[in-house]
Amino acid sequence: MQGDRLATQQAGTHEDGPEGRAAALLETSTFWLSDEERARRAATAEPERPSPIGVPPRHRMRAPRRPRSGLPALVALGLVAAFFAWVSAEPFWLAVGHDVNGRATVTRCTGDGIGQRCFGQFASGDGFSRVDRVTLLGVTGEQRAPGAVSPARMVNLDGGQAYVGETGVLVQLRWTLGFVLVLLCGVGIAGLTGARRLEKPRARLGALLLSIACPLALLLGFLAAAY
């Protein structure tokens, strides 16, 4: 009995040693397997999961805006776009040469600087047409005196504004900035109404184009009315 027990302990010591571990690795190695056995072991093995390290997180689409928050922004920016379209229409036509040349006579001016308002009469260059009451823009210095006569232009005789002096940088800047601000209002409408939060790319693009097209349509309407 003692001999058997001693032999068992020696065998266990031999298996736990380096030689035993090497033998165990050789027995479990795929080197000794046939092609069929390797295929079966690969099919039953658990697939490796990719490491989350270095993998960019998926972009989550934000929830669409509620109508009660997007509708006021749409109305407000639409009114702002209409204002800029209105103040830019006549300067644009003057800049491209669509105008009636004549002379303006100042009747009175009030205020100063940005708050200045001047009124007077406009007579066409041929002397056959006259507008009795117009708002005069661009009046400066001695031109403010009642009865002063200065060269002026109007887009058409049905309009209510006459521009004193030549087409300068201010007129060009006025319509250019107005057009840019109208376009920015369209971009703001797209952002505040949640156009970028739509799920499909085609829907996002369509909403963006529609948001920009609405202020541009207002601009075209004011240009047609001022022509």
Image: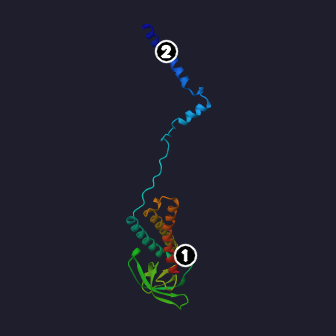
11 vs 191: above or below: above
Tell me the crowding category of disc 1: few under 14, some 14 to 19, or many 20 or more residues within 10 angstroms, Cα based: some
Q: Badge 1 is on which residue?
A: 95
Question: Most extreme residue toward the bottom, as rendered?
Answer: 128
Q: Nearer the viewer, residue 200 or 153?
A: 200
Q: Which residue is mark 2?
A: 14
Q: In this rendering, would 96 be left or right of 162?
A: right
Q: Residue at x 52, y 79 (%)?
A: 224
Q: What is the tally of numbered marks visible in this picture? A: 2
Label 1 or label 2, whichever lies nearer to me, is 2
User: What's the residue type where badge 2 is placed?
Assistant: His
Of residues 184 and 19, which is closer to you in this image? 19
Compared with 93, 1 (above or below) is above
Residue type at numbered disc 1? Ala
Secondary structure found at label 1: helix
**Horizontal and vertical percent for residue 49?**
50, 39
Q: 153 or 23, which lies in front?
A: 23
Q: Quadrant of residue 74?
A: bottom left
